[in-house]
Image (cartoon, rainbow, N blue to C red):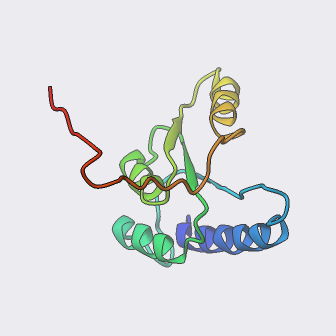
Amino acid sequence: GTNIIAGLRKGEKLAKIGKDLLKNEGLEPLIIFLTDGQPNVEMSDPEEITKTATELNTLSPIFSLGFGNGADLDFLRKLSLANSGFARNIYEASDAALQLKLFYYEVASPLLANVTFQYVPGQVAIFIK
C-alpha cells in the first residue's frame, strides 16, 4: 500500500531541517512528492491528506509527480496547489525520462520565493474585458 501522509510528514520534517541549515545560503527547500497517487494506508481520504499536509507545511512548495495511468491526478493537483506547487503525471511511455527531465527544468531554478504584493488603496484599477 501507499502511505501518502507518512511520506508527506517525512518530507515536511526534512524540508524544515533543510530550511534551518540553509537559511544563510539564500536557498529554499522544496518537496518533490513521487507517488502512484492512490492513498490506501493510514489516511486514505484525499481531502484529509491535503488538509493535514497543508497544516504541517513549513512554507515549502510541494510538487507532485503521479506515476502511471492510475494516479489520482485531481488529488495531486489539489495537494500541490494548496502548497504553492503543481502536479504532473508521468505517463508510462518510452519518453518517461524526457518527462522527468522537463519537470526538473520547471522546478530547478525558482526565481522568487515568498513574494507578497501590497497595493496602495486608490492606486490600483481593475479592468475587465
Does residue 38 lie above or below 19 as drawn? above
Outermost residue, front direction? 122
Q: Position of residue 58 (x, y in %)?
A: 60, 71
41 or 106: which is nearer to us? Answer: 106
Q: Position of residue 5 (x, y in %)?
A: 54, 72
For image coordinates 84% across by 64% down, the residue present is 24
Outermost residue, left direction? 129
Q: Position of residue 71 (x, y in %)?
A: 46, 46
Outermost residue, top direction? 94
So how many labels did they put on this image?
Answer: 0
Quadrant into which the N terminus falls: bottom right
For image coordinates 46% across by 37% down, the residue present is 69
Q: Is residue 101 left or right of residue 60?
A: right
Q: Is residue 35 left or right of residue 116?
A: right
Does residue 100 lie above or below 12 as drawn? above
Q: Is residue 44 left or right of residue 68?
A: left
Within the image, what quadrant is residue 28 found in?
bottom right
87 or 15: which is nearer to us? Answer: 15
117 or 99: which is nearer to us? Answer: 117
Does residue 46 lie above or below 98 as drawn? below
Does residue 4 lie above or below 32 as drawn? below
For image coordinates 19% across by 32% down, the residue present is 127
For image coordinates 69% across by 36% down, the residue present is 104
Quadrant into which the C terminus falls: top left
